[in-house]
Structures are given as C-alpha cells and as structure tokens.
Image (spheres, grey):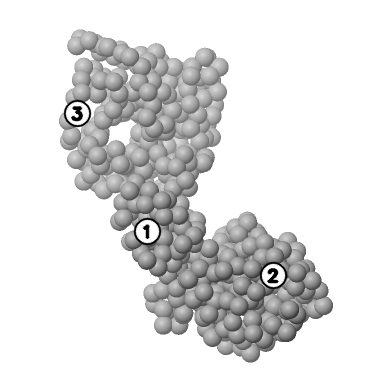
Amino acid sequence: MNPYLRVADWRKDPVLFVREELGADPDGWQREVLQAFPVERRIALKACKGPGKTTVLAWLAWNFLATRPHPKVAATSISEDNLGDGLWTEMAKWQSKSKFLQESFTWRRTRIESKDHPETWWMSARAWSRAADPTQQADTLAGLHADYILFLIDESGGVPDAVAAAAEAALATGVEVKFLIAGNPTQLSGPLYRAFTSEKHLWWRKEITGDPDDPNRAARVDRVWALEQIEKYGRESPYVLVNVFGQFPPSQSNALLGVEQVAAAQRRVELEKDQEGQPLILGVDVARFGDDRTVFSVRKGRIVWPQRVYRDLDTMQTADLVARAIGELDPDGVFIDGVGVGGGVVDRLRQLGFNVIDVQSGGKALDPKFDDRRAEMWWQMAEWVKNGGSLPAGPELPQELSCPTYFFTPKGKIRLESKADVKQRTGGGSPDLGDSIAFTFAIPNLPAKPRHYGKDFHFKAPQPIVGRAETEYDLFRDQG
C-alpha cells in the first residue's frame, strides 16, 4: 500500500492512521479523542495516572505532520525534562514503527523536520522557565505563522495560563489551527482547570478515569493497583481523586491537621506502661543561629514526650547534646535533619561512634505517593495524631502542626509547603517543633529493643549549656 495515497483518508480518520501506519489498536477513550480531532479546534484531556494520554498526543502530532501541508507544531510541558522524557520520547517511539514517517521526517532532540521542507514543515519542543514573568511565559508558544498549526501542552495541570496565551490567540488565524491540552488534574488553576470549569463550553473535553468500578475506565490503568490505592488511602482521599479517578482535588492546598485535632491530641492521655514493646525514637531538627530553633523530640508508641528547644547552638554544641540524650535514653533510633548545618552534627556524632541516621528531607520518599521524604514523614505524623497519638502541652504546637499545607505536583505526587514558604506566608517562624516530631516517623515499623525501667526509674536531665540554650520544655523529665 502506498502511504501517500492514504494521506487524505488518514486526515479524515486518525483512527485509521494509527491502525494502518502505526500498527496500534487504540483503547475506547483514545478512539473518541482521535475521532474528535478532525472536527474540534480545542481538545482537553483530564486524566488519571497512566492511561496513555501522552501516547494519544504523539499519535495526533504525527497525524497532523503527515496529513497537512507545511504544518507547524509546537509542544511544551511542565518542564524541559518532562517534555523530553514524555511526549518527545513517544514521538520517537511511534516514528520507529512507521517506514513512511522515518523516510519523510528527521527526529532531533528538540525538533522534528520534514526532510524535503525542513524550514516550513516541522514540530518543535519548547520549554518555559518557572522563574519567568507572565510575558516571558507567553513567549513559549509564540512565533508560529502558517496555515496549519497545532499546539500541544502535555502535563498541562501544572502549566500557567500565560503559557497557553499564544495558542489561544492563534486560534483566530490560519486555515486550521488546533489546541490540545492533557494532564492530571493537580491544580485548581491553569488552562486545564479552566477548560473543565469556566471555559468548558469552548472545549471538547474527555475525562479519563482509572476507577475500578467504572465500566468505561481506562484499560491501561492496572485495576489491582487502583484497588490498592483506594483501600490504602480511601475513595475520598485527594491523592486517589487525582491519580485514580482523574478528578480535581477538593481544594488547591490543604492543611494536614487542624488546630482542634492537635489540641485534642494534647489533651489525650496515654499511659507509658501501655507503650511497652514500642520503639523509643529521637528526632532532631537542627538549626544554628537566627530565628529557627533546634528541637529534640522523643516518641514512644502513641506518646510524644515534652520537647526540648534550643536556640543559637553551633554544630558541636548540638552534637554534644544529642550524644548526652543518646546516653540517657538509649533510643532505638536517632533521626537527624542532615540538610545544611545538620550534616555537621551527623558527621560529628558518627565520628564519636554513635549510630545516627541522616534524614534528607528533600530525598526520595519510600512511598511513591509522596514527592519527597518531608511530605511523607509529615503525612505519617498527621495520621498518627488523628489515630490516637498523644502530644505534649504547649501553646505553639497546635499552630505549627496545622500551618504547613500540602498540594499536588504536576505528576500527582503530594508535596508539603516548604519552611521558607510557611514563614513568608504567615510572617511567623519556622515549624521546627513539627519537623522534629516528623523525623520520628522516618522509618516505619522500627523494631524496639527489650527494655524494662521499673516503677521508680526516671531519666536524669543533662546539664544545659549555660548561656547558649533556651529550654522551653524538658525532654528528660520523669516519664514514669
């Protein structure tokens, strides 16, 4: 079959193009999108995680390049890396399956060109800077002038409105100008959100779900995985809404804990004798000088003991205090904030022979649901509070634990508001008390060593560093 004789049919029927030239059989929802492409100018895809939406964008990009004369296609995503790893890789994958596309086009790292007309027949990968102002962001998709133009935005849930501005303006020109956006519904702003809310009358829209109970669910989303997420986090969980059901979260950002939930945990009485066999864990959030504080927190089972708070300590003084705490408490685990100045504390303690664990808050989470370790630890701490944890008294703790909010990254992962952003938003201090407690959740199911204190046992308080430490709560008071 001569592919050049099929171009007119492929233009009218992209499903035929995908089947005949690319050798693929589209899923049901993919066929709907492909069928809408010849007649719709604006197409928006709101999707759960992993249904094959980027594949559809690649199919349609190749269809447009192969069936329109001298077209120009501009593609962008939430980041240059995401575009390269996602849509641009899909373009290469599907070109490799077609002798016609290989003979007709040259694939490059940021550009696909017609071999016969490279100056006027192409597709370009375009990146935008998060640091750019709206005017600069709007330039991302600007500069296209042709009769046939296609704009593609992959992972559009995290793309600002300004990036889409040029595409919106270009719809008024040309013989055939199309605008396709697709992404996970992670944010209550941006072009994807508008397409499904205030501007839904302007768009042909497709919602793609992985809901295991929906007969029209995306077949490529593993049903067992979807059921596991629902069982683990609940059907109403924002994480499940975004990643399994393909629905927008209930709010742009959420507090992990409310003030009343923390206050209730402070009133909650848990007996030490009932925590027998539970690990005793020391978490240390390290600061040096300035407004931030160094905070020691000890958790045993369902109890967090009164915290000890220090100001204006250097790393050697902090390491000395941690060493003394280890000697007094004999904890099952010691978790220290190893970011920045905390790294010096970790190094000094290891030099002294102590087995401490360096926690990198920005490191990879153990659970892929989270964007980093800090979000994961805070989430686990919040669940512990809600499920019966007992917190120490103190007026600052309710405010600190309820202050940081969480949100979804463009890839559908949960991220916690940074310390710097909390301080800027509230005009207050850093949530050091909360971070210190969160560190005690760094390793789930930590085993406890056998220990028996006896009814008259009490911990001996170390001597403070005179003139350098401000003790707000006594970590080592009698817990008997």
Query: What residue do we see at 41% from left, 60% from top?
Result: 210
Q: Quadrant of residue 114?
A: bottom right
Image height check: is 61 above or below 274? Answer: below
- The image quadrant where one finds the N terminus is bottom right
Query: What residue do we see at 44% from left, 28% from top?
Result: 335
Q: Which mark is residue 124?
A: 2
- Please name the residue that numbered disc 3 is placed on: 270
Q: Is residue 101 visible?
A: yes
- Between disc 3 and disc 1, whose residue precedes? 1
- Please name the residue that numbered disc 1 is placed on: 212
Q: Quadrant of residue 325?
A: top left
Residue type marked 2: Ser
Image height check: is 295 above or below 188? Answer: above
Q: Nearer the viewer, residue 263 or 277?
A: 277
Mark 1 neighbour class, 10 Å CA radius: few under 14, some 14 to 19, many 20 or more: many
Tag 2's secondary structure? strand
Whole-angstrom CA distance, mark 2 to mark 3, is 62 Å
Residue type marked 1: Pro
Q: Which mark is residue 166?
A: none
